[in-house]
Image (cartoon, coloured by chain):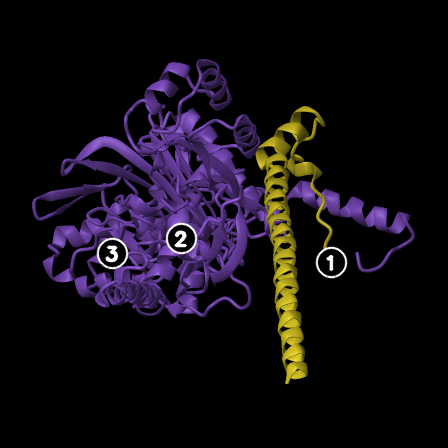
Chain colours: A purple, B yellow
Amino acid sequence: MKKQRTVTFNHNPLLKRELPAWRPRIVMLALMGCSLALAGRALYLQGVNDDFLQAKGESRYARVLEVPATRGRITDRHGDILAVSTPVRAIWALPSDARLEPAQARELARLLEMDVNDLNARIAAGRDFVYLKRQVPPEVAQRIADLRLPGIHQQKEFRRYYPGGEVMAHILGFTDLEDKGQEGIELAFDKRLSGRAGARRVIKDRRGQIVEDVEAIRPPRDGDDVALSIDGKIQYLAWSALREAMEEHKAKAAAAVVLDARSGEVLALVNAPTFNPNNRANLTGAQLRNRVFTDAFEPGSVMKPFIAALALERGKVKLNTPIDTGNGRMTIGTATISDTKRHGTITMAQVVQKSSNIGTVKMAQQLGAEEMWHLFDQLGFGTPLNLGFPGETSGRLRPAKSWRPIEQATMSYGHGISTSLIQMARAYLVFAREGELVPLSLTRVDGAPSSGRRVFSVDTARQMRTVLAMAAGPGGTAIRAQIPGYTVAGKTGTAHKLEDGRYARKYISSFVGFAPASDPRIVVAVMVDEPSAGSHYGGTVAAPIFSRIGEGTLRTLGVAPDMPLTPLQLAKRSAEEVVTASGGQENM
Amino acid sequence: MVRVDAVLVALAVASALGVISAQHQARRLHTAFEREQVRAQALEVEWGQLQLEQSTWATHGRIEKLARDRLGMHLPPEGQVLVVEP
């Protein structure tokens, strides 16, 4: 039954046929060629082209992250915060990814306090990248993040806050949305304030989470804090005095500066009208102008003391030299110079006290043009202060060679020359500091104040102080500059404004003075532009502001009164009674 | 020969494990470091906000208003000033 099969499974009749010898060799060669190609390719990828591929691979997963640095704080001289940056978020969208349900869009619009149509229009605008809203508070941003909306992203940024608001607005300036200085101190000290963002390289996984910190490319460096010379309290006093005066005199603008006479520090610097730097919407227009620095005006009579001092220094006059001011009119060439009142023959001190133009011109006529120019130059007129403030004006001082006699005459009483308020305030330091002029500082000066440059002799400066004290005393133009308890000295100025090269019937009233007159601690300069409610004289408009600011400043600085008043004498007696009554405490 | 190989293999394995644990350690420390940095930053931010808040409360204008309106304070008139001389 069983039949043995002779054919096995591995028996193939085909195999019996001899293959040609070349065929296995071809296959062999082909296989070898393939593997050689593979090996070559591997060698190429691993060896030759390695760097490029490594970089490519890393670029898929490695990211360089910016590590933001915080902008430095600005403080006043006591360390009170005037400007500080806190982190906020910018909400932005990738319109290609942002497909929001109507409900989602409404919710987002509500959180962003935007109109929902406006929001949709922005996303649909067809750009690659669109900011929905910037400077969003972190809490709101967190709630938006919790919504997990597609295509809506956030980015960290900073917002700068100014707790002082409009009081400090002009001195501080403000920053732009990128936290870069735009105006004021923010711009002047931008280098010091702005930090340098750091960078680090990390590897992120597919979901964007950091798995490994590869290297810190550079650490972030936060901006330095800047301590200003400004005293917050004095600044506030000056601001409120100025604000009231603006209303009272219906003025177009006003400005004031308070300097520390000993160190040359700027204690307060105020402009009106002002603005609120915390509200970005109103960061435009004329209110941003820092008039103290950027506006040059013809100072008028506040210039007279310098001419008087120069005449005194050169020995041309003494305080009691009689000067004939005639009937209040004087002709030079074709021009006529006049006084507001006829003073007749008065002493040199009275010329300054009564602010006589003719008397001043007569003193100036004894001086050379070159001499006067040199004085103006030494006082810093015509040269910017270089405090780094944006838009600082140099004022206008023409070279002495081009002066005509009438111009030399008008310059002696402050016309035909222009200065900024801060230049004028600084120039008055020569009287307050025994004839020396020091550079001003917007930052707190620690340690010994720098030595100044001598302009007048100590003797001249002291004599001029008594003259200026007369000007602010009975019989002077600035009796309303008086501060109870202190001696004051200073000079008023009332200058016509130049409009299109002609003198208009508009005025700038000013007062520059210092107190206490016996040992000056502060210099205060006040300027009111176009007072239009009745009076426009420096003595009635600017001097009372000086008095208010000066009083508050001296009290804040704790300067002892140098002028005993009758009520004070009374108070002193009762103080002694208190002392004896309480058992004679010593060293009161 | 076989023994030497075994030792070398063991060493290689141990070293590999070491690398793994070191890497793990590094990652853990890094996250901890990261966390602390974030915390430090958050504290810094909070400090800034508190300073801001403080100076907002302490605005001279606000203090003057409170002193005048609520506490009924005023500047002493000339006659009431007492100067104590040293």
Q: Report whether residue A588 is seen.
A: yes
Quarter where residue B75 is shown: top right
Quarter where residue A53 is shown: bottom left
Q: Are marks 1 and 2 on the same chain?
A: no
> Pointer 1: what residue?
B86
Which corner quadrant holds the C terminus of chain A?
bottom right
> Pointer 3: what residue?
A382
Compared to residue A485, the image places residue A440 above or below, namely: below
Residue furthest front as drawn = A1
CA–CA distance between discs 1 and 2?
Answer: 45 Å
Nearer the viewer's eye, disc 3 or disc 2? 2
Q: Which mark is residue A190?
A: 2
Q: Is residue A293 left or right of residue B17?
A: left
CA–CA distance between discs 3 and 1?
Answer: 46 Å
Q: Label 2 lies in what chain?
A: A
Q: Is residue A327 left or right of residue A81?
A: left
Q: Residue B83, position in %: x, y?
A: 70, 48
Q: Which mark is residue A43?
A: none
Q: Nearer the viewer, residue A99 or A569?
A: A99
The amino acid pointed to by label 3 is Gly
The residue under the point 74% across, 47% down is A572
The amino acid pointed to by label 1 is Pro
Which SS class for mark 1?
Answer: loop
Q: Label 1 lies in what chain?
A: B
Q: Residue A390, position in %: x, y?
A: 32, 49
CA–CA distance between discs 3 and 2?
Answer: 26 Å
Which SS class for mark 2?
Answer: helix
The amino acid pointed to by label 2 is Asp
